[in-house]
Image: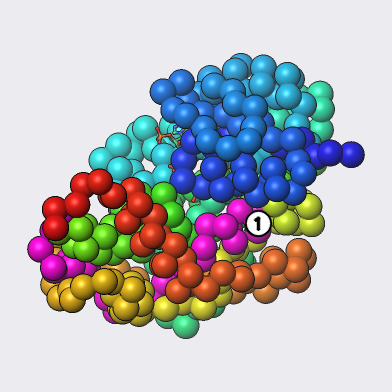
Amino acid sequence: MRVKALIIGAAGFVGGYLIDELDRNGQEVHATCLPNEKISGNCTAHTLDILKKDDISAILDDVKPDVVYHLAAQSSVALSWKKPRLTAEINVVGTLNVLEAVRECEKKMRLILIGSGEEYGFIREGACPLKETENLAPGNIYAATKACQGMLGGIYARAYGMDIVMVRAFNHSGAKQSPMFVISDFCKQIAEIEYGLKEPVISVGNLEAMRDFTDVRDVVRAYRMLSENGRSGQVYNVGRGQAVKISRILETALSYAKCGITVTQDKARMRAADIPLIEPDVSKINEDTGWKAEISMEQTIEDTLDYWREALRGNENV
Ligand code: A2R
């Protein structure tokens, strides 16, 4: 039987990739976005604000999906400091609305809750690679709301026997990502420099931090595979399982540049308390689903740079 999937919050960076992944795998894809947003990809689009619980119920009753992927979120750490209440409303109350709507729906379905590697927060020395059993010590408001989402998911799975799988996704990147994220930021600056839109100087933050980067196409494949073979009530790290220094990302990105570029460190890009190393243990997802990251970091960087070259084409000043 053809799997019917519903993606809640599909107009963001990950949503378009997930639509493509499920569609390519022969699934019937339904996807929601806010009234002012647009969804791209082969799917049936619905409008939904997750703060309106009855509207979630109406869509579930109408679509009767086998799997629901919950991506809708206030996903910016920076904005979570400025708008803590809004972040908590969308990420916690919104998730509760989704959980309640799924619980009340007559059709039984699997719910995939997308959380974040940020949930681990202030990790103790020697804790990496982080196992899913590691304590959570969120260091920002976004992370706290995602940790709360995961806890609620665990509670609903246990208390009501619901079929819920929780994900902690580590850094993911690719074409179309906002330049608020490091790979996209470096690639955008390089494309701007190549087109003469910026001095040949790239500004960077802390290059010593080590982070775990996965291509967004691998990440959405992980979500699909978890929907097929993840164990209910369980939490899964999704990441490459091999952190790299930001300086290596920078060197790789610069090696693809078509002109000479110098590097300058920008204090505004340094974080007050940057955790030196964040790296997940990904053996659990690998053992349960067979998933592992396949696309190299070099490929992700090349594709992201090509995306920015394309996006900025026509604005050349050379
Ligand atoms: O904030 P907007 O206007 O870009 O809209 C976001 C949307 N969203 C909502 N959808 C329904 N009801 C709401 N009340 C609501 N508030 C915000 O969810 C956006 O279109 C989508 C999330 O997409 P992004 O912010 O681009 O996140 P991304 O990178 O696609 O990550 C997907 C998930 C999120 O749960 C992240 O926290 C996690 O993966 O890492």
Question: Can residue 118 be seen by looking at this rendering?
Answer: no
The magenta span reads 197-223
Disc 1: CA contacts within 10 A as few (<14), some (14-19) or many (>=20): many
Name the residue at 41% across, 72% down: 211
- State the residue in front, 109 or 222: 222
Q: Amino acid at mark 1?
A: Arg
Where's residue 267, x and y in %? 13, 65
Describe residue 230's horizontal placement relative to residue 9 as left or right: right
Name the residue at 67% across, 17% down: 58
- State the residue in front, 222 or 94: 222
When asked about the image quadrant of residue 273, the answer is bottom left
Quarter occupied by the C terminus: bottom left
202 drawn magenta = yes
Farthest residue in the right direction? Answer: 1
Question: Can residue 82 be seen by looking at this rendering?
Answer: yes
Where's residue 64, x and y in %? 77, 26
Residue beneath label 1, please? 221
Describe residue 94's horizontal placement relative to residue 306 as left or right: right
Where's residue 128, x and y in %? 50, 78
Name the residue at 28% across, 49% down: 312
Quarter occupied by the N terminus: top right
Where's residue 317, x and y in %? 14, 53
Farthest residue in the bottom direction? Answer: 126
179 drawn magenta = no
